[in-house]
Image (tube, rainbow, N blue to C red):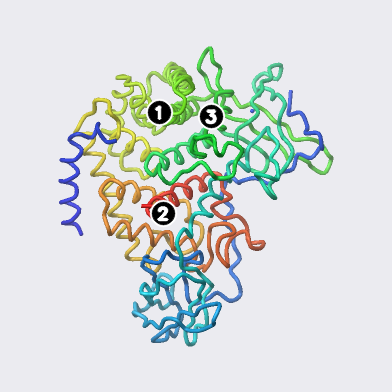
């Protein structure tokens, strides 16, 4: 595989010789007087009490497309030699398979084996049964299995829209009255209040942070950029059917809030809206809500997200896209005034520079890009913000330094190779340690793999990506689907907490991951 990597790097160096051608006073209470609402969580809460009895046969509980490779993981002190796939309707065995023994796993202190049933391609609902181990959770085989999950992941941001009424027609059980529709006092000077309603709630208090928002927005925009055909105009939100992909409509709703967070004269960007105390404590006192002061980091994150949105939205509304780009430029310039002596070590500045350079060709931005990419310490840090900046740079039509393109490609290939090797050495074929607390890192790993696979279409990386997908949907040591409500034993089915779809930032990465699945199945 190392030899293969060298060949690929050389090929990419030739390919990228032309890389520029690749293509929210306090809130006014809502009329009902009820400030409670169900929302995403910004900070992961993936606590989960393991069931008394966990199946020893682990599968993707959502299922598999007919032609997918289908492998179950078997765990236990005693493992049988064979297994059966049972049709849930007829209760008949429709496939008999044999286990490939892997032996004892020292880290997990268990025996593991694999059972391949890829030959079974008939659509239906099934489970696996084996002597000693019993049965697995159920799963399906069929086309378009991930579409409902994908659309629901995208709709999470609609459910968390602030400042508007969510009707039953679009939000179902998430319907509620308009919330947080008044002005908010500036924390530094309470004599000043501003209307910064709108945007997305990031947790159950209704807090909204610019940096957190910008990162989630940019992840979804990158997914749209790479897998545009996966995003349609029929996700069941008010904007559906307007001729613009719903993902762009949803991000635009957040953009409108972001624009309210900027002083249009100076360009400075307020860092966020914070809620101190609970919405309804025992005394009945309302929570204190303030507008946080501006920060350089918020301005750079703002510039990154709005410049990226502007670039992708220009085909639908050039005037609005230009307005967003001008706002991004103002934020960038104000940040530069506040930190003119800073060295090239800031990932937000790098990503903002890359987006502004692609969208407007500013040479001052390119100078910082060169400075950042020269740093070994920062460049090889695995981080989705750095990743997004790199992808933007190698896909720009502006003039670029080919040595920087080659450097980026080598870094991406190195990261993809390390992730793949970690996955292949894991009994669950995913680059994550035992336990559920690593979902965020796993999703970041998938982003790196997907970017590289998008560029070079490597079969091995495709297989590793699929194995990570299977891990998230149940083929893990917890035998639980981390995607809320999807899978027989998933987060959202009981009192076990919140999964990755209900977390503000991880949901954007889930959208990213599933967009590739939808794109590939459609192609």
Mark 1 surroundings: few (<14), some (14-19) or many (≥20) residues within 10 A: some
Circles 3, 1 touching at the beta carbon (< 8 Å): no
Seen at 60% across and 71% down, the residue is 51
Judged by depth in the image, the label closer to the viewer, 3 or 2, is 2
Q: Which mark is residue 284?
A: none
Seen at 73% across and 32% down, the residue is 288
Residue bearing the label numbered 3: 255
Q: Distance between the residues labelled 2 and 1?
A: 25 Å
Circles 2, 1 touching at the beta carbon (< 8 Å): no
Q: Which of 255 and 51 is in front in this view?
A: 255
Residue 228 shown left or right of residue 86 in the figure: left
Which x, y percent locates residue 207?
63, 36
Residue bearing the label numbered 1: 311
In the depicted structure, whether residue 239 falls above or below residue 432: above
- Element at badge 2? helix
Q: Which of marks 3 and 2 is nearer the N terminus?
A: 3
Q: Which mark is residue 517?
A: 2
In the depicted structure, whether residue 325 falls above or below residue 129: above
Q: Quadrant of the N terminus?
A: bottom left
Q: How far apart are marks 3 and 1 (CA)?
A: 13 Å
Residue 20 shown left or right of residue 484 in the figure: left
In the depicted structure, whether residue 27 falls above or below residue 282: above
Q: Nearer the viewer, residue 384 or 457?
A: 457
Seen at 37% across and 20% down, the residue is 341
Which x, y percent locates residue 283?
84, 40
Residue at the far right in the pictured view: 283
- Element at badge 3? helix
Q: Is residue 335 visible?
A: no
Which x, y percent locates residue 307?
43, 27
Q: Which of marks 2 and 1 is nearer the N terminus?
A: 1
In the depicted structure, whether residue 491 falls above or below residue 388: below
């Amino acid at each position: 595989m190392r030899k293969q990597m060298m060949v690929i790097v050389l090929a990419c160096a030739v390919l990228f010789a032309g890389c520029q051608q690749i293509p929210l006073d306090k809130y006014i209470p809502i009329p009902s007087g009820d400030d409670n609402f169900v929302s995403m969580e910004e900070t992961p809460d993936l606590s989960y009490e393991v069931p008394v009895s966990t199946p020893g046969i682990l599968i993707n509980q959502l299922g598999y497309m007919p032609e997918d490779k289908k492998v179950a993981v078997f765990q236990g002190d005693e493992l049988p030699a064979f297994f059966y796939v049972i049709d849930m309707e007829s209760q008949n065995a429709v496939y008999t398979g044999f286990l490939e023994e892997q032996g004892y796993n020292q880290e997990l202190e268990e025996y593991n084996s694999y059972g391949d049933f890829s030959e079974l391609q008939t659509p239906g609902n099934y489970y696996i049964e084996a002597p000693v181990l019993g049965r697995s959770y159920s799963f399906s085989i069929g086309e378009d299995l991930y579409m409902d999950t994908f659309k629901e992941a995208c709709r999470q941001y609609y459910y968390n829209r602030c400042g508007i009424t969510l009707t039953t027609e679009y939000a179902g059980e998430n319907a509620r009255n308009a919330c947080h529709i008044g002005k908010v006092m500036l924390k530094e000077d309470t004599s000043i209040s501003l209307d910064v309603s709108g945007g997305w709630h990031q947790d159950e208090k209704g807090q909204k942070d610019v940096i957190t928002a910008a990162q989630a927005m940019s992840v979804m925009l990158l997914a749209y950029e790479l897998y545009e055909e996966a995003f349609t105009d029929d996700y069941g939100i008010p904007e559906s059917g307007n001729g613009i992909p719903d993902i762009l409509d949803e991000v635009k709703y957040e953009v409108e809030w972001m624009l309210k967070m900027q002083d249009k004269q100076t360009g400075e960007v307020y860092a966020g809206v914070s809620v101190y105390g609970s919405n309804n404590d025992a005394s009945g006192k309302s929570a204190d809500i303030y507008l946080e002061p501006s920060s350089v980091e918020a301005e750079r994150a703002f510039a990154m997200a709005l410049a990226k949105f502007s670039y992708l939205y220009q085909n639908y509304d050039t005037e609005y896209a230009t307005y967003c780009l001008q706002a991004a430029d103002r934020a960038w310039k104000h940040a530069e005034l506040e930190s003119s002596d800073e060295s090239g070590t800031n990932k937000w500045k790098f990503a903002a520079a890359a987006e502004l350079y692609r969208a407007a060709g500013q040479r001052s931005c390119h100078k910082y890009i060169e400075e950042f990419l020269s740093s070994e310490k920062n460049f090889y840090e695995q981080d989705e913000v750095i990743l997004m900046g790199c992808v933007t740079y190698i896909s720009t039509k502006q003039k670029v330094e080919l040595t920087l393109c080659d450097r980026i490609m080598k870094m991406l290939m190195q990261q993809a190779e390390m992730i793949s090797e970690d996955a292949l050495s894991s009994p669950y074929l995913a680059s994550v340690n035992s336990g559920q607390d690593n979902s965020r890192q796993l999703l970041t790993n998938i982003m790196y793999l997907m970017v590289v696979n998008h560029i070079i279409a490597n079969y091995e990386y495709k297989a590793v990506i699929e194995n990570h997908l299977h891990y998230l949907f149940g083929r893990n040591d917890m035998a639980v689907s981390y995607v809320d409500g999807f899978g027989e034993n998933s987060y959202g089915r009981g009192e076990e907490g919140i999964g990755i779809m209900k977390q503000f930032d991880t949901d954007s990465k889930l959208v990213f991951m599933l967009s590739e699945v939808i794109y590939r199945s459609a192609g």
